[in-house]
Image (cartoon, rainbow, N blue to C red):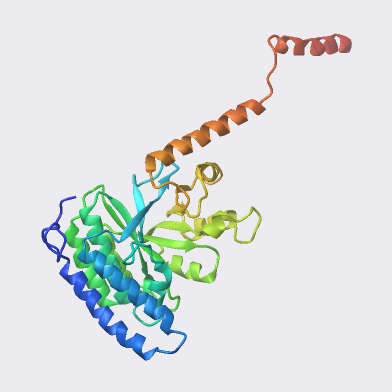
């Protein structure tokens, strides 16, 4: 991909100054909050969040990727995108060890910095997307950030600068929301005009899911089914049957993505039982698309062979032999 990135210039010689400025501002502001929390139970998670942010800044300065890509693997010929994948934060400390992203992000969310950290991560993700080969990616944010004017302005400007090609796609994946805050349809439409899609993450059967789906009705192209539902035993209250029925009622046109899939055999079983699920995703699935495809087809072939082995097989002439009792019965009846 050779398109310019706003605020970056030549991707090999300049930094994304807007991104670095936003990181610096958040570090400075959050440090003051950490100082105020000294000695309280809030201090430890806040310090960890600050450490992750500093490490992220160092990776940006070193022009290193801060996201890994977890593919949405295709399990249906009806899948509309050829190679989508979720961008997952993978910050490393000074020893090169991965730092757990969830507690760090929640430290900012829980202390009033949701749009600030989301804005930083979104711009970093777009920068990585622009310089690498991935063509279709989803980026996680909170729905609350879509209510923040600065987040909306900065991300819309950056997306517009990318000038997405016909085979490229940015998907905003809503992983957390606040039910009492209504979304602005006008703002959401601005993203849609630029070719951005929406995915609703971790959908189950609770009331928050009902509200999230209602807010994005007619706008969300994808619904990602929570791994607990995908892996729940059949017949449980929150099992996949119930969630798919619920989703079909509220968002019948959305594409379903099953999360938490265990392996290619599990993926094949889902494809047979739920033809409306077009993609699968899972921590233990391979990141190599061709490797998954081979495993999926092998699972399909194995299932078909087993089905064939269970079919009754009659020896040659069996059909003729079967006619004899009928013929004798006919004679007896005559």
Q: Nearer the viewer, residue 4 or 92?
A: 92
**x then y, percent, for residue 11:** 14, 58
**Residue at left offset 45%, top offset 65%:** 213
**x then y, percent, for residue 296:** 47, 38
**Residue at left offset 36%, top offset 91%:** 36
**Image quarter of residue 95:** bottom left
Q: Is residue 19 above or below residue 233?
A: below
Q: Nearer the viewer, residue 187 or 132?
A: 132
Query: Is residue 187 shown left or right of residue 79?
Result: left
* Any part of residue 187 in sight: no
**Image quarter of residue 178:** bottom left
Query: Is residue 304 shown left or right of residue 121?
Result: right
Picture mark count = 0
Residue at the right extreme, as displayed: 332
**x then y, percent, for residue 26:** 27, 79
Look at the image and tell me in which quarter the C terminus lies: top right
**x then y, percent, for residue 167:** 26, 47
Query: Is residue 155 shown left or right of residue 265?
Result: left
Q: Is residue 330 above or below residue 131?
A: above
**Residue at left offset 40%, top offset 88%:** 37
Query: Is residue 222 shown left or right of residue 134?
Result: right
**Image quarter of residue 67:** bottom left
* Any part of residue 9 in sight: yes
Q: Nearer the viewer, residue 193 or 46?
A: 46
Q: Is residue 73 above or below residue 68?
A: above
């Amino acid at each position: 991909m050779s398109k310019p990135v706003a605020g970056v210039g030549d991707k090999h010689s300049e930094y994304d100054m807007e991104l670095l400025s936003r990181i610096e501002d958040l570090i400075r502001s959050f440090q003051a909050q950490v100082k105020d929390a000294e000695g309280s139970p809030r201090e430890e998670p806040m310090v960890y969040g600050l450490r992750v942010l500093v490490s992220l800044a160092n990776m940006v300065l070193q022009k290193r990727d801060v996201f890994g890509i977890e593919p949405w693997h295709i399990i249906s010929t009806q899948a509309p995108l050829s190679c989508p994948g979720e961008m997952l934060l993978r910050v490393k400390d000074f020893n090169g060890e991965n730092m757990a992203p969830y507690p760090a992000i929640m430290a900012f969310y829980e202390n009033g910095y949701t749009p600030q950290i989301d804005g930083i991560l979104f711009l970093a993700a777009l920068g990585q997307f622009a310089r690498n080969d991935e063509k279709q990616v989803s980026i996680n944010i909170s729905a609350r950030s879509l209510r923040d004017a600065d987040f909306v302005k900065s991300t819309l400007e950056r997306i517009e600068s990318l000038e997405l090609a016909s085979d490229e796609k940015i998907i905003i994946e809503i992983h957390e929301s606040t039910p009492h805050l209504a979304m602005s349809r006008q703002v959401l439409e601005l993203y849609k005009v630029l070719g951005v899609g929406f995915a609703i993450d971790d959908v189950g059967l609770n009331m928050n899911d009902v509200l999230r789906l209602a807010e994005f009705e007619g706008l969300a192209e994808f619904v990602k089914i929570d791994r607990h539902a995908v892996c729940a035993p059949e017949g449980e209250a929150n099992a996949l049957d119930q969630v798919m029925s619920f989703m079909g009622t509220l968002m019948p046109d959305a594409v379903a993505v099953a999360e938490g899939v265990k392996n290619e055999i599990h993926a094949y079983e889902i494809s047979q039982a739920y033809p409306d699920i077009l993609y699968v995703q899972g921590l233990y699935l391979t990141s190599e698309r061709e490797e998954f495809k081979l495993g999926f087809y092998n699972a399909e072939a194995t299932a078909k062979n087993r089905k064939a082995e269970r079919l009754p097989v009659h020896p040659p002439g069996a059909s003729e032999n079967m006619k004899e009792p009928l013929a004798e019965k006919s004679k007896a009846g005559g």
